[in-house]
Image (cartoon, rainbow, N blue to C red):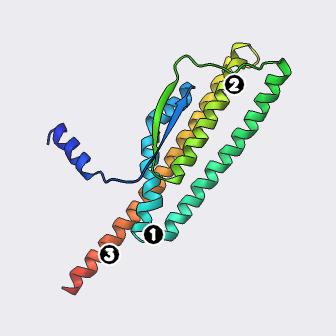
Amino acid sequence: MTDDTVDKQYEESKSSRPVIEREVILYSEQAQRVYRRNFQQVDNNAFSISVISRAHGNYSQAALAEKDIKNQLAQNCEKLDLELDRIKVLRERIGLVDEGVMSNPLSVKARLSANLSMEFLQLLTKMDDFLCLFEPLVILGEIDYDQRQAITFDWQKRMNKLCTVIRTYAEDLRSLYKGQQEKTSVSDDKLQ
């Protein structure tokens, strides 16, 4: 099979779904990297958890997955709020009122097909805002480069971990549905 055939089959297998398009500008390298590498997959998996799993009859499993993911998003949001408060205090202490400007912002139209992906994007943009407030402190020497590396990449790692959690739940729910299909198929074979 050629690559063109595989691409054509993939395009034909994609189904239409409702989406909300949201214009987003990401300034920090870390937020851009998370978006580029993971956001489309996060949205697809969130749609799979929230909509497709329910269509297959896995209501309670989908609800449990959503609840756990939302809790993890909320916990990370709370941690980020604490980091933002600390940075704002430090900025006020040194009299820094200017926001950081990044040299190469990424402007995208994010396509959202599930509430979970919207919440993930909100957390990602909040992380981006934090890093824009944070970076000038590094430039001014208030935060050293080792701390910068640890903090910025820790937040990138947290976001990537959330992507993995969402993907894992979607895969588990797909496996559950496939298992149900196989049982139904075996039962149908026995009836014949």
Image coords of residue 40 (percent x, y): 42, 42
Dot 1 and dot 2 residues touching (CB under 8 Å):
no
Three-letter amino acid code at disc 2? Phe
Amino acid at circle 1:
Asn
* Sequence-wise first label, 2 or 3: 2
Looking at this view, name the residue that lies furthest to the right.
Answer: 93
Q: Which residue is mark 3?
A: 183
Q: Which residue matches tag 1?
A: 58
For label 2, count other residues whose C-alpha is less than 10 Å away and answer few (under 14), some (14-19) or many (20+): many
> SS class of the residue under badge 2?
helix
- Give the image location of residue 131, x and y in percent: 65, 27
Residue carrying label 2? 134
Mark before the other along the chain sequence, 1 or 2: 1
Q: Secondary structure at mark 1?
A: loop
**On-image quarter of the N terminus:** top left
- Say which of 10 and 157 sits in front: 10
Label 3, label 1: how far apart the Cα atoms are: 15 Å
> In the shown orientation, is residue 141 left or right of residue 35?
right
Is residue 71 shown above or below 79?
below
Say whether residue 104 is visible: yes
